[in-house]
Image: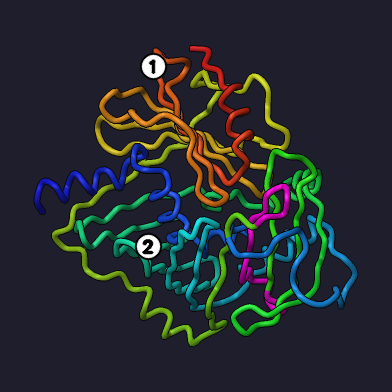
Amino acid sequence: MNRLAGEGAERLASLADAPWRRGWMRRMSALALLWCAGGVLSAAAAQGAFGGGSGRPVGPPQRSVDEWLVRLQQGSSVPSFVGTYVVSASNGAMASARIWHLCQGDVQLERVDALSGPPRSSFRRNDEVSLLLPDAHVLRSEQRAPGGRFPNLLRPGADQAAAQHYTAEETGQDRVAGMATDVVVLKPVDPWRFGYRIWSERRTGLVLKTQTLDAAGKVLEQSAFSEVQLDPPQQAVKTQLAMPSTEGWRNVRIERVRIDAAREGWRLEQPVPGFEPQGCFRQSMGASSSVVQWVFSDGLATVSVFIEPFDAKRHVHAGVSSLGATHAMSRRWPGAQGPWWVTLIGEVPRQTLTALLDNLRHDK
């Protein structure tokens, strides 16, 4: 492999790469992992206010927020599915992927092939994820924390925590990809988080479509199956889950070790309401590259705070960016002469990132 291809692979494996490329690649490569965790995926269509779906709510009485989280979690019981998934933002940006998913006992297997942008495929066995970048002949692998970007919504106390910050309103029934769904809106009770409109397949609970909504009810992003097959023959799915040969490719291993943020000297002077720390990790991507990732969540929305030593050659683009519901904020910390470079990425309002960054402290 030539030198330029090698450098390109390092950028794809580095947290210094553009946050939107990383975020959308991760979104396409971990969709089924999020569903199995009961995570709310984000989304962008042209509906205008909280509410939605068609018809009046029918069937069982209104579920509470925690009951809805349990319901969405049931999507992990689907033994297998195959479908095409599309994520679009309100500015017209769009990405799509073909997904094969199989659960066999305690083992979950997935393959996600990007249908837009550079060719890439992701293979997952439980929490071990391999990303294939065929143009650069690079195989990137890592052990991810259980639940992916979204913590397990059914961890002890998570449902009660979410219930403090969202209300649930069932708005009717609808059809997505030819399947009957129940529609619910999870509306935030404060401005620190977005709302969600979710279409849940009636029989299995599988999330077929979601929209992320701002405070005015505007759709920021939309994620939806354009077509999906539930419970296809498992042997046919298994055939697609076999990884192709990567002989001669460059292997990049992302090492991820759980650490204690307090022992590393990191803390928040004042917490942002509802956003509790879910874990802190050190990611190593080579002999001289190490990044701390501190994850916060309110049970639905998640923010990652990436902290690394400042490097004048790489860290040149401070500021705030947004795409759909995702906001990113990068800054030299603390102040213009600080020794650290901090990047926050999350599907939350910009003010949530600002509050987390303003309250970040280091005691060592």
Q: Position of residue 363 (x, y in %)?
A: 53, 13
Q: Pick whichever, 61 or 198, lies toward us.
A: 198
Answer few, some or many: residues within 10 Å of disc 1's Cα (few below 14, many 20 plus, some between 14 and 19): some
Which residue type does callout 2 highlight? Ser
Outermost residue on the bottom side: it is: 233
State yes or no: residue 328 in magenta: no
Query: Which residue: 48% across, 87% down?
Result: 233
Is 96 rendered above or below residue 204?
above
For the residue labelled by badge 2, is the local secondary structure a helix, a strand or a loop?
strand
Instruction: Pick the quarter of the image with the N terminus.
Output: bottom left
Query: Which residue: 64% across, 61% down?
Result: 211
- Disc on the earlier residue, 1 or 2: 2
Query: Which residue: 49% across, 31% down?
Result: 259
Name the front one of labels 1 and 2.
Answer: 1
For the residue labelled by badge 1, is the local secondary structure a helix, a strand or a loop?
loop
Q: Which residue is mark 1?
A: 339
- Give the Cα separation between the discs numbered 1 and 2: 35 Å
Marking on residue 108: none
Answer few, some or many: residues within 10 Å of disc 2's Cα (few below 14, many 20 plus, some between 14 and 19): many
Q: Position of residue 245 (x, y in %)?
A: 21, 68
Q: How is the image coloured?
A: rainbow
Q: Position of residue 75 (x, y in %)?
A: 64, 69
Q: Which residue is mark 2?
A: 122
- In the image, the segment drawn in magenta is 201-218
The reply, left or right, for residue 225 in relation to residue 120 is: right
The reply, left or right, for residue 177 in relation to residue 247 is: right
Which residue type does callout 1 highlight? Pro
Q: Position of residue 257 (x, y in %)?
A: 43, 37
The reply, left or right, for residue 146 in relation to residue 60 is: left
